[in-house]
Amino acid sequence: MSLYHTYLQEIEDRKAEGLHPKPVDDVALLNEIIDQIKDPNHPEREASLNYFIYNVLPGTTSAAGAKAAFLKDIILGQVEVAEIDGASAFEQLSHMKGGPSIEVLLDLALGQDEAIALEAAVVLKTQVFLYEADTDRLAAAHEAGHAMATDILKSYAQAEFFTNLPDVEETIDVVTYVAGVGDISTDLLSPGSDAHSRSDRELHGKSMFEHDTVRQNELLELQKQHPDKRVMLVAEKGTMGVGSSRMSGVNNVALWIGKQASEYVPFINIAPVVAGTNGISPIFLTTVGVTGGIGVDLKNWVKTVDSEGNTVLDADGEPVLEQVYSVDTGTVFTINTKTKKLCQGDKELIDLSASLTPQ
């Protein structure tokens, strides 16, 4: 049986578990897929195109190397694929996050075809995952008088990969989902007992809320009810993200409530919005920031004080808390990134300067 037919069987097995096709990371499988794309009469050609364009792991996987090389052949006119023109090939390379794609873009930018070199340079100026070998290659070309290499290096020196990014939306409408009362551990978001599945992001996503499908379905229903809003995951009367599984925890949260990072890369999401009455655990907040997300210190409960300014205690000696505003599931807020305020309608509730730093 071919690797491709084994892959189709795996797809059927995953479908029975409610899962989509696993992203391709093996070069041998992708080479079979590419051969089927080249054959205009192959019965699996359309499906193969879909897997090639939308279901290959980027970065330094062996499959990424084969994808980058095939896209290079398309750009150079050595292979013709009606569904993938040069612009589409460059677009896909721009989403492959380093590794072989950078090598291909450098080949094209430093090549003989000026028009292709210019297009490759435009893409390269947006890329940040360059290794020392890549920058050394640019430096050597610059020193040899290659104008395109010099232009690319100037762009990097001016940080255009950052300064040319689109502006953050001025307002972000969010709807709350209270994930729990009290501190929320990363084990609730990404259980340690499911560590074996973390490389399969969609499968690991099923472990959210410790496999509690009732809460998972509540979250999905909330998203259906508010398609124009982002879900903000809340730790009511607690801190969000305590524990050590910060990266897998954030990945899982982003998978459920974040935005897809690239249409060409499945199950990798970014920019989740999380919140806690007592804020976000520092290392969890750092990881949220790395993904482009926002962590909100809600301060929606405060300690009650008496007329003399002393904290009022309950029968157990614990501070009596007073609610400043509600964040019950389904509550709608607006994050204003310009004024750095959390608002409800026209009312400003809290300052978000600490959540919206220049970083």
Image (spheres, rainbow, N blue to C red):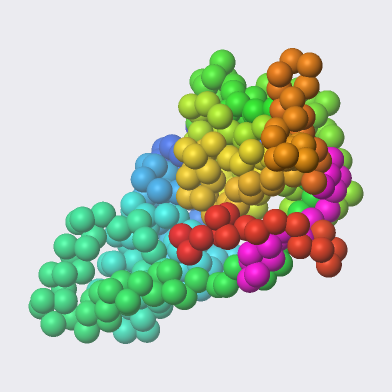
User: Looking at the image, is 295 positioned above or below residue 359?
Assistant: above
Total marks placed: 0
Asked whether 197 or 33 is in front, the reply is: 197
Q: Where is residue 61? Give x, y as percent.
A: 39, 42
Asked whether 339 or 110 is in front, the reply is: 339
Asked whether 51 or 198 is in front, the reply is: 198
- Report the span colored magenta: 325-343
Q: Is residue 44 magenta?
A: no
In terms of image quadrants, where is residue 79?
bottom left
The reply, left or right, for residue 5 in relation to residue 358 is right
Q: Is residue 175 visible in the rendered structure shown here?
A: yes
- Residue drawn at (78%, 22%), measured in percent from left and top? 314
- Residue drawn at (71%, 22%), measured in percent from left and top? 318
The reply, left or right, for residue 48 in relation to residue 113 is right
- Residue drawn at (54%, 36%), measured in percent from left and top? 281
User: Looking at the image, is 137 positioned above or below residue 272?
Assistant: below
Q: Where is residue 278? Give x, y as percent.
A: 64, 38
Q: Is residue 338 magenta?
A: yes
In terms of image quadrants, where is residue 130?
bottom left
In terms of image quadrants, where is residue 292?
bottom right
Q: Where is residue 120? Give x, y as percent.
A: 37, 73
User: Looking at the image, is 47 positioned above or below residue 160?
Assistant: above
Asked whether 143 or 301 is in front, the reply is: 301
Which residue appears farthest toward the right when viewing the image? 225
Q: Where is residue 301? Give x, y as percent.
A: 75, 40
The reply, left or right, for residue 169 in relation to residue 118 is right
